[in-house]
Structures are given as C-alpha cells and as structure tokens.
Image (cartoon, rainbow, N blue to C red):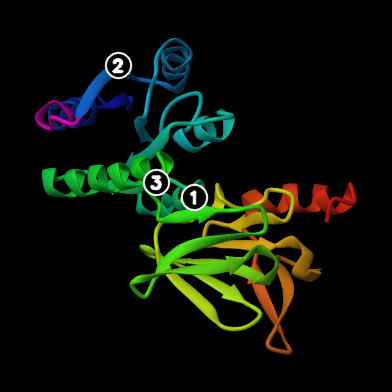
Amino acid sequence: MIKTLIVDDEPLAQGIIETYVNQLPNLELVAKCSDAIAANQVLQNNEVDLIFLDIQMPQLTGIEFMKSLSNPPLVVFTTAYSEYAVEGFEMDAVDYLLKPISIDRFMKAVNKVEDRLKDKQGGTGVSVNEDHFFVKADKKLVKVNFNDILYIEGLKDYVIIRQEEGRVITLQTMKSLESKLPANNFKRIHRSYIVNTTKINALVGNMVEIKEKGENKNIPVGKIYREELLAMINEKKL
C-alpha cells in the first residue's frame, strides 16, 4: 500500500483527488490538508510515501514546501498552471498533473510512483561494488567503472551513462541510479544531469565544462543546484 497525503487548498480539487485515491486499491489515504503547515504536521506524525501536492497555496507554495523538507516523500504536483512544470520536474517530482485531472492521467502518475518505489526498494537492475557497478543494458549486465563515467544524462524513462569510451543506456530513473553512486565524486547539477566532479574542467556561467572525446562539453546547471555547486567549489570539495 502506498501511504498517500493530499495537499490542496481547493475543496473541489481535493475531493476529486480523494475520490481517485479511494478508487485505487494500492493507495491508502493518510490525510488531506488545505495548506503546507498542516501537511508538515502530518508528515511529522505519520509515515507517508506519496504527496499529491498543489503548487499555488496560501502562505507557502507547494514548491517552497517541498524545498523545506530534508527528506521528502515522492511528490506528484497538481496545479492549474502549466508554467510551473519545469520547476516542478527540477524538484525531481515523479509527475506533474494539470487540472482538471482525469482518472486515466491520475493512474498513469500512480504507475510512475510504483516504479519509483520499486527502484528505492532495490529493484533497479543495479549491482554495486566499491569501484564499479553493473547495470542492465542490451539484455545483459554491463560493468561500469565509476572512474570512467564523465556524466549521466536522463532521457524520459532511460538513463545514458556517458563514459570516456562510449556510452551505456539503461532503463531506470535518475534518482535510483544517483543513490548507487559515490556521493563524494558524483553530483546532481540538473534534473537531467549528474556529473563526475573529478571530470569538471571549468564552471562557465550556468554550465560546467567537461572534456568529452577531446572536445569541451558544456552541461547545464539547474538554478536550484547552482548554489550548492558553488559552495562545494568555495569549500574546495571539488
């Protein structure tokens, strides 16, 4: 059962999502709240796997609320405003539902949540060692040495591991793969990119520069990651 919290200040939208949650046997409604303050109290006192989180709310927006959580549950953003989509995905939200939400679109989001939870529980197709790991690719287990990785790029349901020699494409999420990498050498700098920090040659504006096949490759830095990246540079951790 996926323990679910609904956070939405619109009673009609909250009621629709509650109806959908109650229709799916794999979802268990823990609570429903009209603002982030109440939701935070629920999280402190209950186990929650998933939040259906509205973005435009009084006092604290859904995005601000998610940023305030040190270890947030999985989040599916719900909103009437499509312009928040990019920022929502930069927060590593599982999905982004645009109101009015249909039941088929809701079910698709829940399927994504199930896949993400399976990844967290170890069903990622990744076997890890001290200096390498194995990933499922091309119907076989492929060995990838950490030191050979330049950067990792997320592309829809696939992850592309760019190496000094070639690449490996595997079916899984960025978040699941990120959890398997040594934190001291790998850094998430964008919702679609993880870099091997030992391979960074320069920071140029909102880009990091990495040498790939003898040429400079510029990789974007998301605005929510830039401050932490600069702090690592200033503290000489890169």
Residue pictured at 37% horizontal, 47% vertical = 123
Q: Give the amino acid type for the residue marked by disc 3 in the picture.
A: Asp
Identify which residue is drawn at 74% across, 61% down.
197
* Residue on which the image places disc 2: 31
Q: Is residue 161 above or below residue 130?
A: below
Is 40 displayed left or right of 104 in the figure? right
In the displayed image of the protein, which residue is found farthest to the top? 45
- Pointer 3 residue: 119
Amino acid found under the numbered disc labelled 1: Lys
Dot in front, 2 or 1 = 1
Q: Residue at x 64, y 69 (%)?
A: 149
Q: Does the residue at mark 3 contact the one at mark 1 (Cβ under 8 Å)?
A: yes
Asked if residue 189 is among those painted magenta in the image, a careful observer would answer: no
**What residue does disc 1 label?**
175
Where is residue 226? Give x, y as percent: 71, 54
Q: Please give the range of residues in magenta.
A: 21-26
Q: CA distance from mark 3 to mark 1?
A: 9 Å
- Residue 64 falls in image quadrant: top right
Camera-side residue of 58 and 70: 70
Is residue 24 highlighted in magenta? yes
Left or right relative to 77: residue 109:
left
- Looking at marks 3 and 1 on the same chain, the residue that comes earlier in the sequence is marked by 3
* Sooner in the amino-acid sequence: mark 2 or mark 1: 2
Classify mark 1: helix, strand or loop: helix
Left or right: 169, with 238 as reference point: left
Going by the image, does 97 lie left or right of 41?
left
Give the numbered dot on residue 6: none
Question: Helix or strand or loop: what does disc 3 sit on?
Answer: helix
Where residue 160 appears, x then y in whole percent?
Answer: 49, 71
Q: How far is the residue under mark 3 from the one under mark 2?
A: 25 Å
